Image (spheres, rainbow, N blue to C red):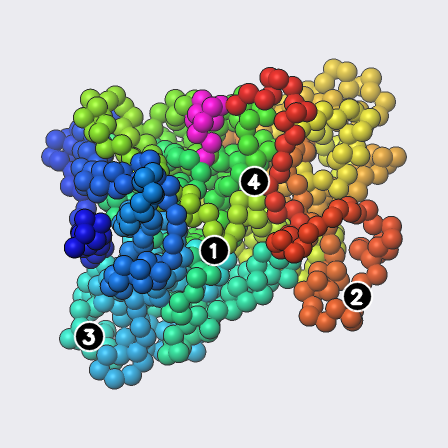
Amino acid sequence: MSAIAARRARLAAAAQASLSSTPEPLPISEKGKEAASGTLSNNSSDTKRLSNAIISEESSSADERRRGDKKGKRIKIAEDDARKQDNLPNSSYDSAYTHNGSGTDVRQTRNDAEVILSKVTESSKFTPILEGEGKNVHLVTKKSAICALEVGETMNLLGRGTVKVLDGSASLGGALLSSQHREALVLASTVSPLPVLEAIGTTSAPAQLKQYGFGLARNYAAVIQVEEDIPSRVGELHSICTQIPKNAFEVSSFYHPSWPLASVGPQYTQSKALLHVHVPNAWKRVLTATEELLQYGQTLPPTFLVRGPKRVGKSTLSRFLLQRLLTKHEGQVAYLETDLGQSEFSLPGMVSLHVFDSAWQKEEGSTPLLFAPSWASIRQPVNAHFLGDYSPKNDPGRYIAAIQNLLTSYRNHWASQGVPLIVNTQGWVKGLGAQLLSQIEALVEPSLILNISEEVDMNDAEEFQDAPLPRIVTLEASPSLFTRERSMNAVEARSLSIISYFYASNLPATGKDILPSWSTSKGILERPPFSIKVSTGLKGGIHILDHGACVSERLSLMALNGSCVAVVISRDDGQDDQDESTQSSPWSTALRKQFPPHDASTCIGLGIVQSIDVANGSLNLISPISEFVIRSAARALYGGDENSHSIKMSIIKGAVDIPVCLSLDRAVLNSLNSSNTDQNIPRGVANVAFADVPYLDFDVNTAEEEVVIDMKKRRIRRNLLRPSQRKG
């Protein structure tokens, strides 16, 4: 056997052993328990132990991997091709080629600690059986089924429905679910990674198992109830957005032939078009250890900051950590979103603070836990600030000031109640981005930093032991090369989030039993707008941010018309600008108002300026913002006071664009989705003939690739920038 073949065999055996082993939770020392009774900053021994334990677990395998690929270039290959070339047995690990620079390709096995999102090469490990000795599925109604899973069996959930653990326990997206928790909502489509449910506990009710006809001889770990048809109507978004296929949630073809439900269930049919989420073993250990850190009394609540470059899984790990804390921590959990371009729960172009309530576990009147892609998880924040761009590089000072204000809001209202904080950061980690990240860390003062890196240098373990707070745990993630083939890129995800927001009929909010739902019966252009008198309704002013170009006042209304704006409310102190009385035009007065300060304002959502009546001094605004949202935000601005409050509203235009489909009416959208192109062709848009509708004319080579308008990365002409703007 050659040296290369022997190396392949050793690596394959090591990977198989790693995948078959169950990760043990990290113990916390007695000394650490004693230190936890003090302030969080003194709780260093446990954090150090957590980090060193993870480093020691990963050091040997990481060193082995780094020898082959530190100077090389990884090239993704299909798993089945790898097995054919090496005659390796069928297994669940992924493979990669490493080019060592000398012309030799050396096979290298990647363990599951490197995998975050990968092509689905295997189906769920749960196979439904409805009859016989091996029965593990009991059909309650046509829309509800009870399943018994053995230890290690998994369900790659696909479709729309709810999941409830009746006995035992199971993990789902970082959350640990048991019979004490109420049902969780699942919205999983073919265009987003599938959440994976895994049975991890032991059942304690043999009589219940016998009642459903399940065999008692098998080692069942969890009894799960799956129900379909939650009233979200999320599937209707396909008629608006081209990124969602018509059958994205009609996925019965991916189920096992014996699976009894039609709209939710475990994915069984193998397909390279699907993605599912892997939880690396190192991540499992981190989640377990951070959960244990919350079990001991502390003066200050812990703060977790997740950082790393693009496409390494920061948002995924942040969400896993959030869902773990919500299912194991009594009380609330705060989540600070600082990523302007790819937010998990907010709209693009803003930083936001969310507060999730773990009361969903036991109270029927609370919002249940939601497992859905980011575009279907948009919720109303408790506080937010609009920056108007997908990157902070145009205005880094205001970006840091906005984050600082959100942190102040968290510390004034929730830190004193023992609410832990999770901070998700942007993926810009070089140049100016690194400086901003350093400033954020200084403001947050995290007790633990979860650093996701493509390459982990385990030689720094000795230096880490004496490092000052905050403690840093470095986790290895899959390189962008292995995740770049996702079905939806960042630009598409941003556009889909905006579309989802404007068609949402309900948005979840803290302390409110609201399930996410959408309505597409009417196009955005067909919905009645808010008619706002500028002089009385926009006392906070009209503000146009100079992202990319400065707009003169005489062209401001032209730039504002038909654009996407942020709606901001602020405290009204009753004092207008001194020169307001001298202004003859309400538009000039509104355009010259001072920008609302962060400490006295909050962004409550987005709107579209439908039209402007210059002579009448009014404009029409289309927005899903409700009266409840305005009142809740007003109370928050005044410290939670339930009395009536005086507020003023302003609108801010930035560089957030409107997706093209939001400019089309229902007739045009129906014709685009119709298979019959010869009938029912509309003659215009919104009662305007096509000949009078402005349009862009450009050449497209459709032979090279499928072109979707408004879905490509925005380019900046660097040669038109000032020298000071080209830095970073």
Name the residue located 77 percent from the left edge and 38 percent from the top edge. Answer: 561
Task: Give the mark nearer the N terminus: 4 vs 2.
Answer: 4
Q: Is residue 328 left or right of residue 156?
A: left
Q: Where's residue 220, x and y in %?
A: 21, 68
Q: Position of residue 410 (x, y in %)?
A: 43, 31
Mark 3 vs mark 2, CA separation in Å: 62 Å
The residue at which mark 4 appears reads as 348
Q: Earlier in the sequence, mark 3 or mark 2?
A: 3
Q: Which residue is mark 2?
A: 681
Q: Are marks 3 and 2 in contact (CB under 8 Å)?
A: no
Mark positioned earlier in the residue sequence (1 or 2): 1
Q: Which residue is mark 3?
A: 207
Q: Position of residue 700 (x, y in %)?
A: 70, 50
Up-down relation of residue 280 to residue 189 (above or below): above
Image location (x, y in percent) of residue 683: 84, 61
- For the residues labelled 4 and 2, the Cα–Cα distance comes to 34 Å
The three-letter amino acid code for the residue at tag 2 is Ile
Front tag of 3 and 1: 1
Q: Is residue 16 left or right of residue 567?
A: left
Magenta range is: 427-437
Q: Amino acid at mark 3?
A: Ala
Instruction: Look at label 1 and name its amino acid.
Output: Ser
Distance from Cα at disc 3 to Cα at disc 1: 39 Å
Tell me if mark 2 has few (under 14), some (14-19) or many (20+) residues whose alpha carbon lies within 10 angstroms of its own: some
User: Pointers 1 and 2 in contact (CB under 8 A)?
Assistant: no
Please name the residue that numbered disc 1 is placed on.
192
Q: How many marks?
A: 4
Distance from label 3 to label 4 (Cα)?
A: 51 Å
What residue lies at 17% left-to-right and 75% top-to-bottom? 216
Q: Are marks 1 and 4 in contact (CB under 8 Å)?
A: no
